[in-house]
Image (tube, rainbow, N blue to C red):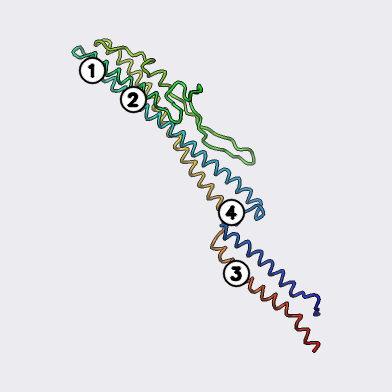
Amino acid sequence: MSSILTNNGAMVALQTLKSINNDLGDVQSQISTGKKVNSASDNAAIWAVSKVMESDQSSFKQIGDQLSLGEATVAVASNASEQMVSLLTEMQDLAIQASGDNVDHAKIQNDITAKHAQIDSIIGGAQFNGVNLLATDVDGAGSTGIDVISSIDRVGAAAPTVSTIAVAGVDFEGSLTTANAGLTAITDGATARTAITEIEALLQTAVNGAAALGSSQSRLSDQGEFVSKLADSLSSGIGALVDADMEETSARLQALQVQQQLGAQALSIANQAPQQLLSLFR
């Protein structure tokens, strides 16, 4: 039955064209944004997962910066401690020279005093951003070390927990400085031999402290590298969830454009059907 009031063919063609236009709009949005899931309305579950992952990725980037800052702080102290090991070795060599009788003990003692004063200067200046791991008071607030945030651990739906790496100070200020080391002044061979033993003890303290700082620096460096790779992995995972496949999207765009043209033609043909009824009244 044909009717001039109800055009079923045109309604079907119009609904088809609307569906094609909606799909075409989605594809054009994917092309313009590069994402197949750009909002919660696109896919609520995937969008929610991606936002949690984006939050974690952002956190890990900040953690990487904190690890770099901590590593730099430890590196300053580590380099300073290694330099002090060299100075103490030179002081020990001088004390050994002074253990003989046919030497100028006063001049050797002056050299030792100068090198020890240099150790004092190194300890006082080995700070980074106000933190000195060689001092008795590391940060001016009574701390004996620093805690560097190393990770945010998320398990299931529970709230994430924060992990840190503790870096202990070595307190060279309390053990190696001129005021606290208590070195015997060299005036003859006997006092020189006493000084040799005392400097050896200071040298072992410096070596142990330098080794501890080096281990902490290495751990911070390894953790920083891991966090950087983890942030990259999260970025790849987020992309796999929400990024549009541009090759597939491009092909779908062309197909939808053809369907749109055909839908428009079908609607035009359906709209012409009532005109054919006029021939029945001629």
Q: Which residue is mark 4?
A: 242
Q: CA distance from mark 2 to mark 3?
A: 74 Å
Q: CA distance from mark 3 to mark 1?
A: 91 Å
For label 3, the crowd category at 10 Å Cα-Cα, with few meaning under 14, some 14 to 19 and many 20 or more, is: few
Q: CA distance from mark 2 to mark 4?
A: 55 Å
Badge 4 element: helix
Q: CA distance from mark 2 to mark 1?
A: 18 Å
Tell me which amino acid carries mark 2.
Val
Q: Which residue is mark 3?
A: 255
Q: CA distance from mark 1 to mark 4?
A: 73 Å
Choose the circle earlier in sequence order: 2 or 3: 2
Badge 2 element: helix
Residue 183 at x, y percent in the picture? 33, 14
Q: Which residue is mark 1?
A: 97
Tag 2 near tag 1, CB within 8 Å:
no
Q: Is residue 190 left or right of residue 124?
A: left
Q: CA distance from mark 4 to mark 3?
A: 22 Å
Q: Is residue 145 left or right of residue 259?
A: left
Residue 68 at x, y percent in the picture? 46, 37
Q: Is residue 217 above or below residue 24?
A: above
Q: Is residue 206 left or right of residue 272?
A: left
Tell me which amino acid carries mark 4.
Val
Choose the circle earlier in sequence order: 2 or 1: 2
Residue 272 at x, y percent in the picture? 73, 80
Badge 1 element: helix
